[in-house]
Image (tube, helix red, strand yellow):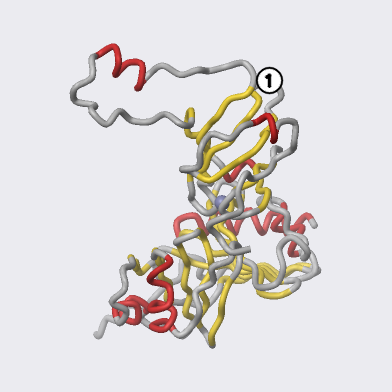
Amino acid sequence: MLLIHCPYCEEERPELEFRHAGEAHIARPENIAEISDEEFQRYFFIRANPKGVTFERWRHMHGCGRFFNAARDTVSDRFLMTYMAGEPKPDLGKAGGGAVRSASRKGTPA
Amino acid sequence: MAETARRISALEGRAYQGPGIALNPAAPASRLSLRAPEASLAALSKALGLILPRKPKTTAESGKRAALWLGPDEWLLIDEGGADLTVLCAKASALHSAVDISHRNTAILVAGEHTEDVLGAGCPQALSLARFPIGAASRTVFGKAEVVLWRIAEDAFRIECWRSFSYYVFSLLEKAAREV
Ligand SMILES: [Zn+2]
């Protein structure tokens, strides 16, 4: 079983407590009523689905309940890192190759 | 003939005792699902008479009342004295959401030297004393049911679960208890 580091619970927890929640860092257009059907399609349906490193939203459904983001390699199924929702997409040049780690410890007291 | 209503627990009559393991339904208690932002915690702590814990997987206790950290803005309060916790929270004017879940949940007490093994039959979390110390609490899964685990002693846990899942949870615990 995979162990996933929850940045809110500040520890590794079994994957059975988590749910995948789609690609991360997709911003909803602020002028959504004005965009074309093609632009809406690109925002709403089109996903990168790469072979390799992908950035995803996950939810600690049966734990703290929080959504957070993760960088995962779709080939090895290895979680490269996890980080709190709202934080910018990390530069994996510094974090790549590691095990399950959180990018940030801020927000909750140690 | 006078007719009187009798309160029947979801786990009425169920219990199991084996070598090094005992399963028993917990006594009725009042319970509260509390959601609140950081800025409200001081006022709510004062109203509830205990300091709401801010650290993940921890609890705070005062007399028969306990607060279990479930998430960064979420707590489960349990009062075995039966106090109306929504009334207490209403004394705090600070922003919060308080939902009485006294009858949504029920609890099972698991005790004995084989407690970790029996829980391990359905719970994927690390339950050693080092990873899950006395006083720690966490929402997790047990088999197919969502539960809240609370370690109340070295060899004893309280399992809070929704009452409609309690028969399943108790049965799975009992099956594991018969095999340790
Ligand atoms: Zn969590």
Q: Which corner quadrant holds the C terminus of chain A?
A: bottom right
Q: Position of residue A24 (x, y in %)?
A: 48, 31
Q: Indicate left or right for B102 with B133 as reference.
A: left
Tell me which residue sits at (38%, 79%) in the image.
B43
Between residue B121 and residue A31, name the one nearer to us. A31
Image: A2 above or below B84:
above
Q: Which corner quadrant holds the N terminus of chain A?
A: top right
Tell me which residue sits at (39%, 75%) in the image.
B7
Between residue B28 and residue A67, name the one nearer to us. A67
Q: Indicate left or right for B12 with B110 as reference.
A: left
Q: Secondary structure at mark 1?
A: loop
> Residue farthest to the bottom?
B63
Tell me which residue sits at (34%, 82%) in the image.
B88
User: According to the image, label 1 marks what residue?
Assistant: A75
Q: Position of residue B68 (x, y in %)?
A: 53, 69
Q: Position of residue A56 (x, y in %)?
A: 53, 31
Q: Position of residue B11 (x, y in %)?
A: 51, 66
Question: Which quadrant of the figure has residue B6?
Answer: bottom left
Tally of marks: 1
Q: Residues within 10 Å of mark 1 (few under 14, many from 20)?
A: few
Question: Which quadrant of the figure has residue A90?
Answer: top right
Mark 1 within 8 Å of ligand 1, using the beta carbon: no
The kind of residue on which mark 1 rests is Val
Res B134 seen here: yes
Image: B43 above or below A85:
below
